[in-house]
């Protein structure tokens, strides 16, 4: 990821940790004019950063916006591949759409596409996803695992574990639970959706496009009437503002670790952890597939991530795809 001059200026001021940074020294070290530095500082102020100018000493950072800019995310990154190339947008139609194009053009493993707002965010089955400006995490990760298309069917469950662990690590009194196959609930309300799409040949995965939508800093009034009773945000549940860049970095950390494990050992290596974090297993559920609707108890999950349901007559059914409702 190549930083612009503006990003380099911001990176150095952030690294100064409250100490003054000389504008002239920035200009000299970056090979630009003092006026160019001043113009970049003006741009940073427009983006929400605040500075105090101390005569003969330079700029002191006094305020940082809750932004998803590459520089902000990079401050928290501890990964080797994931998040090392970031495509950042203030407003985008859908990060998933851009990811498909970038993946076809050869974007490397771990590339992320992230936006402050999506105008056409979508979940499974093309359902709309509310993606208001500056409130959530709307991103897609391009993953290139050495697995077959058949094996890749369980990858959404790996992502769910990674996101859950990231949230639990940063907000220890928040208890997200995984609802098979792709939602995270907190106290029964949805806070996260995951959408995994694939570019593949018959026996080779070229790329998985992992869309992750997280309600981070919404207030209750921010949700439309249609979802107000079923949606929540991390801020509402944690009782504090969510540092979105830190959460993105934590998600990428766990996702990189768990992806490596998944490629080496399959979903079976994460099955026990998934079960511990799930709110599905042991619950009575209603399943809706393309062809039918039926009920039963979610009795387990296979090593391939397939849900098992026990019906009232004792018949065990395997659920490869469908929507479930907790009863």
Image (tube, rainbow, N blue to C red):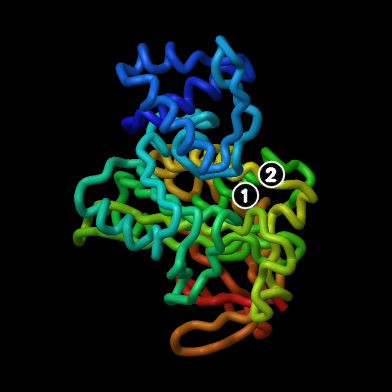
Q: CA distance from mark 1 to mark 2?
A: 6 Å
Q: Which residue is mark 1?
A: 164
Identify the residue at image location x=33%, y=62%.
97
Is 141 drawn above or below residue 24 in the view shown? below
Identify the residue at image location x=35%, y=47%.
143
Q: Nearer the viewer, residue 4 or 307?
A: 4
Q: In this orientation, does residue 145 appear?
A: yes
Q: Nearer the viewer, residue 274 or 32?
A: 32
Q: Residues within 10 Å of mark 1 (few under 14, many from 20)?
A: many
Identify the residue at image location x=47%, y=31%.
41
Q: Nearer the viewer, residue 298 or 165?
A: 165
Where does residue 43 sit, x and y in percent of width and height?
Answer: 46, 38
Identify the residue at image location x=68%, y=39%.
170
Where does residue 307 sit, x and y in percent of width and height?
Answer: 54, 67
Quadrant of res 244: top right
Q: In this orientation, does residue 303 appear?
A: no
Q: Which residue is mark 2?
A: 168
Q: Secondary structure at mark 2?
A: helix
* Number of numbered markers: 2
Task: Look at the numbered discs 1 and 2 and tell me whether their residues touch, using CB distance below 8 Å.
Answer: yes
Where does residue 187 sit, x and y in percent of width and height?
Answer: 76, 62
Could you tell whether 319 is left or right of 188 in the image? left
Q: Secondary structure at mark 1?
A: helix
Q: Residues within 10 Å of mark 2 (few under 14, many from 20)?
A: some
Quadrant of res 7: top left
Where does residue 273 sit, x and y in percent of width and height?
Answer: 61, 47
Q: Nearer the viewer, residue 143 or 44?
A: 44
């Amino acid at each position: 990821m190549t930083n612009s001059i503006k990003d380099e200026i911001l990176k150095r001021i952030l690294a100064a940790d409250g100490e003054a940074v000389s504008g002239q020294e920035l200009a000299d070290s970056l090979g630009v004019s003092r006026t160019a530095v001043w113009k970049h500082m003006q741009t940073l102020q427009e983006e929400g950063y605040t500075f105090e100018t101390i005569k003969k000493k330079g700029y002191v950072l006094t305020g940082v916006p809750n932004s998803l800019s590459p520089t902000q995310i990079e401050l928290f990154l501890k990964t080797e591949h994931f998040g090392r190339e970031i495509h950042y947008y203030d407003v985008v139609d859908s990060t998933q759409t851009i990811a498909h194009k970038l993946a076809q053009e050869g974007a490397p493993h771990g590339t992320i596409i992230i936006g402050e707002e999506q105008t056409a965010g979508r979940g499974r089955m093309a359902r709309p996803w509310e993606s208001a400006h500056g409130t959530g995490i709307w991103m897609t990760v391009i993953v290139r695992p050495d697995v077959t298309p058949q094996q890749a069917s369980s990858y959404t469950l790996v992502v769910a574990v990674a996101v859950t662990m990231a949230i639990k690590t940063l907000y220890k009194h928040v208890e997200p639970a995984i609802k098979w196959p792709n939602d995270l609930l907190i106290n029964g309300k949805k806070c996260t959706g995951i959408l995994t799409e694939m570019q593949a040949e018959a026996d080779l995965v070229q790329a998985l496009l992992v869309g992750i939508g997280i309600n981070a800093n919404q207030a209750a009034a921010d949700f439309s009437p249609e979802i107000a009773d079923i949606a929540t945000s991390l801020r509402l549940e944690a009782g504090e503002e969510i540092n979105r860049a830190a959460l993105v970095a934590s998600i990428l950390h766990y996702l990189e670790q768990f992806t490596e494990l998944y490629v080496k050992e399959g979903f079976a290596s994460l099955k026990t952890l998934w079960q511990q974090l799930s709110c599905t297993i042991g619950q009575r559920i209603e399943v809706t597939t393309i062809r039918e609707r039926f009920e039963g108890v979610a009795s387990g999950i296979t090593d391939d991530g397939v849900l098992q349901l026990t019906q009232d007559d004792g018949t065990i059914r395997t659920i490869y795809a469908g929507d479930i409702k907790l009863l």
